[in-house]
Image: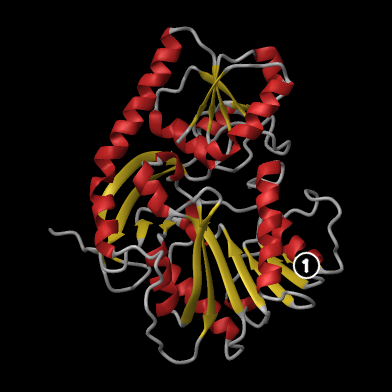
Amino acid sequence: MTATPSICPSCIDGKMTSFYQVNNVPTNSCILLDSKEDAIAYPRGNVDLKHCKQCGFISNMAFDPKLTEYSGRYEETQGFSGTFNKFHQHLAERLIKKHNLHNKSVIEIGCGKGEFITMLSELGSNRGIGFDPGYRDDHIKGRSSDNVTFIKDFYSEQYTDHQADFICCKMTLEHIHPTSDFISMVRRSIGQKLDTMVFFQIPETLRILRDCSFEDIYYEHCSYFTPGSLARLFRRCGFEVVDIETEYDDQYLTIEAIPIDTEKHTAALPIEESTDELTALVESFTQRSKKKIDDWSEHLKAFSDQGKKVMLWGSGSKGVSFLTTLNNADNIEYVVDINPYRQGYYMSGTGQKIVSPEFLKKYQPDVVVIMNAIYTKEITRDLNSLNLHPEIIPLI
């Protein structure tokens, strides 16, 4: 009996072809887990990345949304990093200036703990609405409650009557499997308000494929976009693509688009890769990534054989994926995180305790593996301030 080919959730036409699998991975990476036992016993699922040659979209077609949780115990904020806050502030200021966001209404879909919608509202004297089931009002101090309203729910059809001059959605679309349905819903919510600017930010997948960044592949991220596949999705769903950029050391992909009421065929932007270029990267990814995974497994074994104490810096999704993909990280006892809301909890799937940087003074690690190289300077400075000088290895 022949299996039915998977239909692409983005173009609703192309067939999806499998190219990368990881089985038995935790279905949430950022959930706060109270004990090592709870962390190790956390529910598991499979990753089966498939690629649509027609539009370029990549998706985990083994994804089951019932296995994920977005609630008050989902702790994902990066707002305790000076490096990230500088980027975030600059992004808000740039969007406000570029789109004249002053005394306007703004919406953020998937606002997390509310940092960005608050900045947009306060810096531009705008009226903001943030949607997120995991929002908590005890995380960010100094929030202007008069300017921002938070709705602790997923954005859906029941909220499409909320109109805005600017709609943003950051690091959320990658968590949504029926991507065409979702972007079409956003377009319907805008209706004939054709001057509404839409801004989305997601992880950039060409970098993941080129660099074999296996740590950026995990269960919650069921949808993976490149500049070309993202632009094609928005055009199919009734938008004109105004701009596409990569940011944050090319880790993030951003798109700006405006709604149109007639079908309009516009030329691809220079940043958009061809489907042939993407297919070549996809078809070689499994072999190339296996070598990188094997190399890291050998590094960890060598550290263990030498009796070296190894720690990870960064307890979020990258750290969870790194540990669960390698399967030989037993000698790593602790993971460091500067986010105080994550400290004292345990890594989903593998059970390492999450500790503060101060803990390192007692532990005296020999090696610190940094999960995101963009924070290397910041982390090195923090280690030096503790009078610690371990070998530092950024994951690149």
Kindly state the secondary structure of the residue where label 1 is placed. helix
Percent of width and height locating residue 281: 28, 51
Q: Mark 1 points at which residue?
A: 121
**Kind of residue at disc 1:** Ser
Percent of width and height locating residue 306: 45, 7
Q: How many labels does the image show?
A: 1
State the residue at coordinates (80%, 77%).
Answer: 103
Give the quarter of the image for residue 54. bottom left
Does 158 sit above or below residue 77? below
Local crowd size for mark 1, using a 10 Å CA cut-off: few (<14), some (14–19), many (≥20):
many
Front one among 371 and 220? 371
Horizontal arrangement in the rendering, residue 349 relative to residue 213 (left or right): right
Location of the N terminus by quadrant is: bottom left
Give the quarter of the image for residue 53. bottom left
Does 340 sit above or below residue 206? above
State the residue at coordinates (62%, 36%).
Answer: 33
Percent of width and height locating residue 138: 80, 50
Front one among 159 and 356? 356
